[in-house]
Image: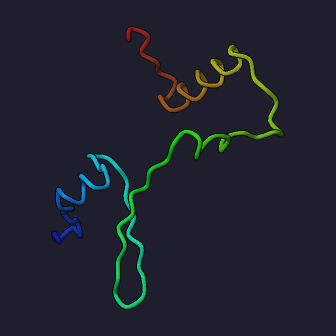
Amino acid sequence: MTGKGQVTIPKKVRDAFDLHTGDRIEFVLEKEGVIILRPIKKSVDDVFGWLFNPAQKPLSVEEMNEAIGKKVTSHSGGQIDESA
């Protein structure tokens, strides 16, 4: 383990779990000092509907574009580079 708490996962383990750079994993602490390494793999089916809110009215494309424009403007201090 490095000074930052980083660990190297052996290639055999990465291959067995099909892990790649940027993949997420979790460490599960069990009894008696056992640690389980578990890949966090989410499919579209796993997350489908997370953002659905039946109380929110549907927005038109124009309304979505306007809301995005307002958010971008507020984060850029009112300065938008339109040359991009």
How is the model colour-coded?
A: rainbow
Viewer-proximal residue among 58 and 24: 24
Viewer-proximal residue among 25 and 10: 10
Instruction: State which quarter of the image contains the N terminus.
Output: bottom left
Q: Residue at x 58, y 46 (%)?
A: 46
Q: Residue at x 17, y 56 (%)?
A: 11
Q: Is residue 64 left or right of residue 12?
A: right
Quarter location, residue 51:
top right
Count of labels in the image: 0
Residue closest to the far top: 83
Q: Is residue 47 left or right of residue 58?
A: left
Give the percent coordinates (x, y) of residue 47: 59, 44
Q: Above or below — where is 27 with respect to 13?
A: below
Q: Above or below — where is 21 with respect to 13?
A: above
Q: Residue at x 37, y 59 (%)?
A: 25
Instruction: State which quarter of the image contains the C terminus.
Output: top left
Quarter location, residue 65:
top right
Quarter location, residue 31:
bottom left
Q: Residue at x 16, y 69 (%)?
A: 2
Q: Above or below — where is 72 with respect to 84?
A: below
Give the percent coordinates (x, y) of residue 40: 43, 55
